[in-house]
Image: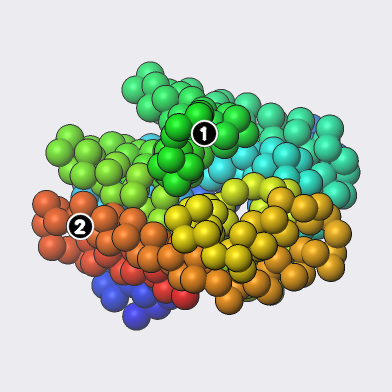
Amino acid sequence: MTDVGPFGLSVRDQALEADVQAGLAAVEEGLFEATKSEVPFITEAAQHLVRAGGKRFRPLLVMLSAQFGDPYAPGIVPSAVVVELTHLATLYHDDVMDEATVRRGVASANTRWGNSVAVLTGDFLFARASHTLADLGPEAVRVQAEAFERLVTGQILETAGPQDGRDPVEHYLDVLGGKTGSLVAVSCRFGAMMSGADETVVDVLTQYGERLGVAFQLADDVLDIASDSHESGKTPGTDLREGIPTMPVLRLRERAARLGLADDIALCELLDSDLTDDVRHAEALRLLRAHPALEQARRDTVRYAQDARSALAPLPECAAKAALVELSDAVVHRAG
C-alpha cells in the first residue's frame, strides 16, 4: 500500500497503484513539455508553479476515472495535462486578483515579476492547454469550453456578489460550483470519456467530481482561516485580508443577522474594517478560529464530501471506486 496523489491517498491495489503512479509521472513530464517556450523567460515564468509542486488533484481524478474503461487509452494523459494547465493558469490570475504574495510555499508570480507578467503567463498556459486539447477531438473541446465558461462565470459572480434578496450562502455555493466544481468535474469526465467508459459511468463520475470540487474549496476556506502557511502553502487569511467572503465569514454574518449577538456583530464590523492592517488582520483570524462559524463551515464541507461519496453508489465495486471514496473522506479530514 502506497500513498499517491493529494492528502496521502492510500491505494491498496498494486495494479491500480502502478497505473496511477505511471499516469501521474507522464502528466508531470507533459506539464514541463507544455510549458516550454523558445523564450527562456517565458519558460521560467510558466514553469514557476509547475516546479513548486502541488497536489495534482485533478490529474489524479483523471487517472482514477479512467479505470472504468481502458486506463491506457491515448487521450488520458493529455487530457490530464489540459486540466492541470487550466488550473495552473487560473492560479496565476487568482494571485493577481487577490494580491497574494505566496503560492505553494514560494513567492507568487505577481510578487516576483509583477501583475502584467503573471496575467500574461496565465494566458500563455491557457493557450498551451488549448493546443493540447485540439488533438483530443471536438467533443473534448466542447466539454472544456463549457467548463471554462462556468469557471469564468463563477469568478464574475463572486466579484459581483449576490443580487438583492439572494441568500449569500446559496450564491456562494453557486460560485464554487463554477469556480472549482466545473474543472474537477471535467477531470473525472475526461478520464472516463477518454477511457471509453459507458456514458452512464461518465455521468456518475462527473456528478461526483462536481460535488467533490465544492467540498475541496470549502475545505480550502476552512484552511485559509484555521491553518498556518506551512500547512496550506500560502499566507493564512489571504481571502480575509482581501475581503473575499468565504464560507466561515458567510456563516458568521448569517448567525449575526439571525441571533443579533453583540460579539458576532462586533466581529462582523472588524471584518468590514481595513484588514490590510496586520494587527486587525491577526485579531480577526484569532476570533474566527474560535468562532462557531468555522465549525459550521466544516460541517458544510462534510456534507458536500458525503454527497460526492453517495454519487458513486451506482458504480461497480472496484479498487478505483474505493480510492475515490477515500479521496472524498480525505477532503473532509483536510478540513479538520
- Horizontal side of residue 16 vs 271, given as left or right: left
Quarter occupied by residue 265 = bottom right
Camera-side residue of 33 and 79: 79
Q: State the residue at coordinates (67%, 53%).
A: 239
Q: Residues within 10 Å of mark 2 (few under 14, many from 20)?
A: some
Question: Is residue 60 in view?
Answer: no
Indicate the secondary structure of the residue bearing disc 1. loop
Camera-side residue of 25 and 122: 122
In the image, is residue 4 above or below residue 205? below
In the image, is residue 164 above or below residue 214? above
Q: Amino acid at mark 1?
A: Pro
Camera-side residue of 127 and 233: 233
Q: State the residue at coordinates (40%, 61%).
A: 301
Q: Amino acid at mark 2?
A: Ser
Residue that carries the numbered disc 1 in the rendered image: 162
Residue that carries the numbered disc 2 in the rendered image: 310
Percent of width and height locating residue 327: 36, 65
Q: State the residue at coordinates (39%, 21%).
A: 142
Quarter occupied by residue 96 = top right
Percent of width and height locating residue 334: 47, 71
In the picture, the quarter occupied by the N terminus is: bottom left
Question: Is residue 206 in view?
Answer: yes
